[in-house]
Amino acid sequence: MNDILEQLNRVRGVGGSVILSTEGLVIASCLRNDVDDEEISASVGSLIERAQNMCTRTGLGNVNMVHLQGDHDGVLTVTAGQSYLMIITDPHANLALLRLEARPYIDALVERLSL
């Protein structure tokens, strides 16, 4: 799976990526050396859990995407089958284009995870 994440990281606007379980556990990671994949994945897992709780309470259904934007970078998390793909984004990334360009990688990850 790291090979897929490495290819995804070459897409404009992507600064790193992690595939994580619904519990926030790292399945595969391709992040910069200064980022702790387990720490960020646990935080994203908690965020997804809270977002799912909000979606359930408001009748929105299941969480498909969560986006956070900070002063320096952002985090885009999308469903990938029964897992989540977290992408660290450049602050100037075109998110609509990034979601389209990430789709083949998400599909490849889903296929690999189902084996």
Image: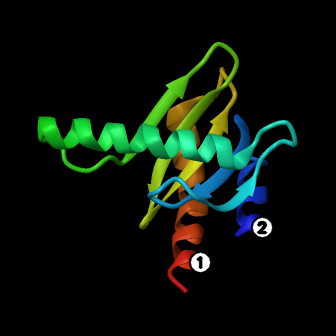
Q: Quadrant of residue 91?
A: top right
Q: Residue at x 58, y 40 (%)?
A: 98
Residue 110 vs residue 55, the one in the foreground: 55
- Using a 10 Å C-alpha cutoff, classify the residue at mark 1 as few (fewer than 14 neighbours), some (14 to 19) or many (20 or more): few
Q: Does residue 70 sit above or below 51 in this rendering?
A: above
List x then y, in percent, for residue 19: 60, 58
- Does residue 10 appear to the left or right of 60 in the view shown? right
Q: Residue at x 52, y 53 (%)?
A: 24
List x then y, in percent, for residue 47: 44, 37
Residue that mark 2 sits on? 3
Q: Quadrant of residue 74?
A: top right
Q: Residue at x 64, y 40 (%)?
A: 40
Residue at the extreme bottom: 115
Amino acid found under the numbered disc labelled 1: Arg
Residue 53 vs residue 77, the one in the foreground: 53
CB within 8 Å, label 2 to label 1: no
Q: Earlier in the sequence, mark 2 or mark 1?
A: 2
Residue that mark 1 sits on? 112
Position of the N terminus, as image quadrant, is bottom right
List x then y, in percent, for residue 57: 14, 38
